[in-house]
Amino acid sequence: MPLRLAPLFLLLAACRQEPDFDDRYKAAQQQIDARGVAIDKEIETGAPVTSDAATATAAAPLNARQESGQH
């Protein structure tokens, strides 16, 4: 019985819903905003901002896409 259900479970696992346009747009907008904040801080201080929370926030959506296999 469990072997007959295995293809069903594989099919359900493969049919994971991808984010819709609005979700992708929101993530991209947050990434762009965070990069803008980091650039503004870099301009104000005259030194590159490397350990800022805004820089980490900017990289988060990109890292999530790479981990999920999206490009």
Image (cartoon, rainbow, N blue to C red):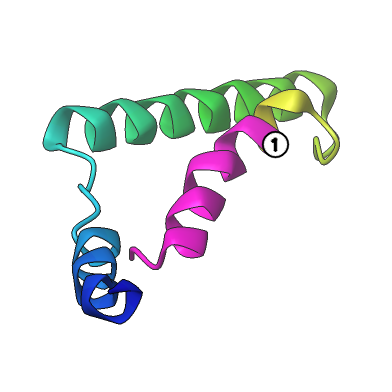
Image quadrant for the C terminus?
A: bottom left
Q: Quadrant of residue 8?
A: bottom left
Q: Position of residue 47 (x, y in %)?
A: 85, 35
Please report the residue visible at 46 percent of the width from the left and 33 percent of the height from the top: 31
Q: Quadrant of residue 9?
A: bottom left
Q: Work out whether 14 lies above or below 6.
A: above
Q: Bin the neighbour count of mark 1 within 10 Å (Cα to Cα): few under 14, some 14-19, many 20 and up.
A: some
Q: Which residues are magenta?
A: 56-71
- In the rendered structure, the answer to whether residue 33 lies left or right of residue 5 reads right
Q: Amino acid at mark 1?
A: Ala
Seen from the viewer's position, the closer of residues 71 and 67 is: 67
Q: Quadrant of residue 1?
A: bottom left
Q: Which residue is mark 1?
A: 56
- In the rendered structure, the answer to whether residue 52 lies left or right of residue 30 reads right
Q: Position of residue 44 (x, y in %)?
A: 75, 18
Q: Position of residue 13 (x, y in %)?
A: 30, 61
Seen from the viewer's position, the closer of residues 26 and 8 is: 8
Residue 68 shown in magenta: yes
Indicate the secondary structure of the residue bearing disc 1. helix
Q: Work out whether 18 lies above or below 8.
A: above
- In the rendered structure, the answer to whether residue 27 lies left or right of residue 4 reads right
User: Mainly helix, strand or loop, the magenta region?
Assistant: helix
Please report the residue visible at 55 percent of the width from the left and 53 percent of the height from the top: 63
Residue 15 shown in magenta: no
Q: Farthest residue toward the bottom?
A: 3
Please report the residue visible at 17 percent of the width from the left and 27 percent of the height from the top: 22
